[in-house]
Image (spheres, coloured by chain):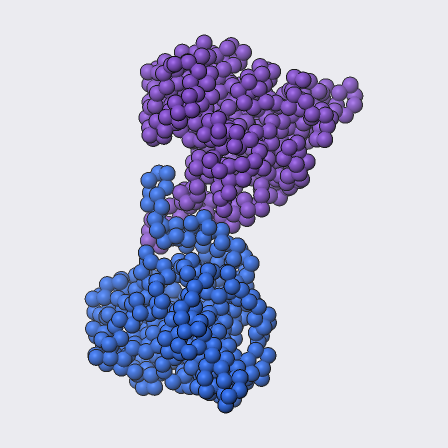
Chain colours: A blue, B purple
Amino acid sequence: MTQSTLIIGAGGVAQVVAHKCAQNNDILGDIHIASRTISKCEAIIENVREKGAMKEDRRIQPHQVDARDSAAVADLIRATKADIVINVGSAFVNMYVLDACIETGAAYIDTAIHEEPDKICETPPWYANYEWKKRDLCAEKGVTAILGAGFDPGVVNAFARHAIDEYMDEVASIDIVDINAGSHGKYFATNFDPEINFREFTGVVYYWEDGQWKETEMFASGRDWDLPIVGTQRAYQSGHDEVHSLAVNYPEADVRFWMGFGERYITVFTVLKNLGLLSEHPVTTAEGQEVVPLKVVKACLPDPSSLAPNYTGKTCIGDLVKGTKDGKPAEVFVYNVADHKEAYEEVGSQGISYTAGVPPVAAAILISQGDWDAKTMKNVEEMDPKPFFTVLDRIGLPTRVLEGGLGGTDKAWNG
Amino acid sequence: MTQSTLIIGAGGVAQVVAHKCAQNNDILGDIHIASRTISKCEAIIENVREKGAMKEDRRIQPHQVDARDSAAVADLIRATKADIVINVGSAFVNMYVLDACIETGAAYIDTAIHEEPDKICETPPWYANYEWKKRDLCAEKGVTAILGAGFDPGVVNAFARHAIDEYMDEVASIDIVDINAGSHGKYFATNFDPEINFREFTGVVYYWEDGQWKETEMFASGRDWDLPIVGTQRAYQSGHDEVHSLAVNYPEADVRFWMGFGERYITVFTVLKNLGLLSEHPVTTAEGQEVVPLKVVKACLPDPSSLAPNYTGKTCIGDLVKGTKDGKPAEVFVYNVADHKEAYEEVGSQGISYTAGVPPVAAAILISQGDWDAKTMKNVEEMDPKPFFTVLDRIGLPTRVLEGGLGGTDKAWNG
């Protein structure tokens, strides 16, 4: 039993995290939500109360903090007596929050790799540039840090582990496919922070094949995937966090990530990128003002949290894993399907925020229960996936399996 | 004979104006070029000298001026003893430069309607919002002001006048068609100041039909035009300056403007407009910076003057005028074809700047010679077009006619 859980961030994902913590506050204790803008924390708390999400009558409090100020975060951890910190702030703050956890001994959970504002797409594996440098220190101090515990990265890492453990002697390839077949009705919008969204796709696309890092470009490699529920969808090879830990943990497997994009997204992205409007480097206007174009694009786009009320349709995210079992080819697709409208009705957020926000709460529950209290730094595929799936089944993201791969026999992961 | 000519502005069009003034400095006298950035004036002068453009060995000098400071412009007119001011600065400065001319008595020439930075697309006729308010004052003081004396507006106004004078008893319609069939080899670029370029197309498209102003939207009305030299080209009804004076001077005619756009332009424009990136109103970034999106887009795009060296292909701009003559239907297409590469070789600018920059110099020559020294404010169609065509023929923009309309008999305007 945890005394209190501190959530860093107050965006769409944080709203899901807050709801799920509230629904499980018999395990996760008091809830504290901290952001640069306290009013956003207050709005989330009001929404949690309105929906009657609190399982037990416990505290839920807003806090103002600059998450890039490690000492301030450490003070807040001490003040709130937080055992667990769920960091769903911008990826720019990860290392500062992690340092605060290492200093105070609180467990750390995040959902993406740390980024520096002025750098896009660093040398692979990306984790080695930041978080993994603190691994020995976590082990030495006995601090639990679960990295990349959203959906992707996160649940898809556990999908890979499960597929390999249960269905293969040897793994040959892991293809992660992320399809959002939902519709928000806008001309264009990103499903999470546009700045982070676009940054994902402006750099080199790294993937792991034949035991080495290879490179391609965004939208250069596309493939149609025939998936459960959402049907045939086109997805493009993209750079993504989980490739960088899975390639290290399963170097014998090819590891690729595929993201679904509609024509509209590709058109808008292509125009903005080619014009230089996705650049993180400042330009100077004719009037002499220094401006980062990407930040202006972000200011012009819809707030991702505003999409939720009218979002319809489903997401399908899964891992197609191939290998051999008893000398014969083996293949399995492990996946989840989530519904935008159901997500909104339950927690007031759209499906993308829902899939990203539920898993770190599952990880927090597992740390609290002792299942995942690693006392060191771990990526998700390094932890036992079964208790993770069990909690995810219970709190809203059931895991299913197509035995034999796409078009195979559909069943629950433990069915 | 003019003592001296003052050019306001130092962009791509100003470079053409400077070259053409230099080639005709036996008529236009000393040349002065003034801009906010004096180094741009100096670069133009260096280019003029390199190309040996000066007909006579006379003065050519750079000046720094803020053209939105009327008093400073008036001081400069007095200091340079300018008889004629050719204003090819931003459309934002027109009224300030016009006021300085009225104060000092210098003749005024511009190539577009005045605009205020925070207003796009005002009530028609656009000229009535700004320049025409000073018409009585010009008449009273005997100041010559020739408005909209670029290509379009400008030469196309004279094309309309010529078609009506020579080929019709009654005019029924004037369709102005502007096709740039050139290629600059970039992913995307505008041919003149992106800010002014986009502003032309973000507002309501006004046109004059059945004796009244009508409205449509950009890209809502497209038509294929089978034109001389450039062949069949798709053009879209657009808002444009000349419609607003021609409709007043020829209220019995329908007056429409058609601009050619390729797929790439339409895609980029549509994305930027729908995302709000062409807005002239500031947005606030997450970091609290106030920024006008359109100015950031401008900062990211290629400088139009940088396109010239690699620009190939031709422009075709003309007027299809329909009416009746001796009770029978009459139709004529009056047009010019210009070549990007030839323009660059002659004056170091691309064809769009060339077509915009040569006509105001022709107008200055006509004022200097007395042909167009109106001693009041005039739009181009209110002046005799024949001396204009004669000068344009000589200085680089020959006028041709298809008698019978598109597909008709091709000849020189005076052939």
User: Residue A319, how many percent across, how many down?
Assistant: 48, 76
Give above or below for A107 relative to B31: below
User: Residue B304, how many percent across, how many down?
Assistant: 45, 37
On the rendered image, what quadrant is the C terminus of chain B found in? Answer: top right
Residue B363: tell me if it is visible: yes
Residue B239: tell me if it is visible: no
In-image side of B156 versus A377 (left or right): right
Determine the residue positioned at 67% across, 29% down: B320
Q: Quadrant of residue B225?
A: top right
User: Residue A72, how many percent across, how many down?
Assistant: 22, 66
* Of residues B358 and A85, the one drawn nearer to the viewer in this rendering: B358
User: Residue B360, how many percent across, how many down?
Assistant: 50, 22
Q: Farthest residue in the right direction? A: B327
Q: Farthest residue in the bottom direction? A: A326
Count the marks.
0
Q: Quadrant of residue A41?
A: bottom left
Determine the residue positioned at 57% across, 78% down: A406
Determine the residue positioned at 51% across, 23% down: B358
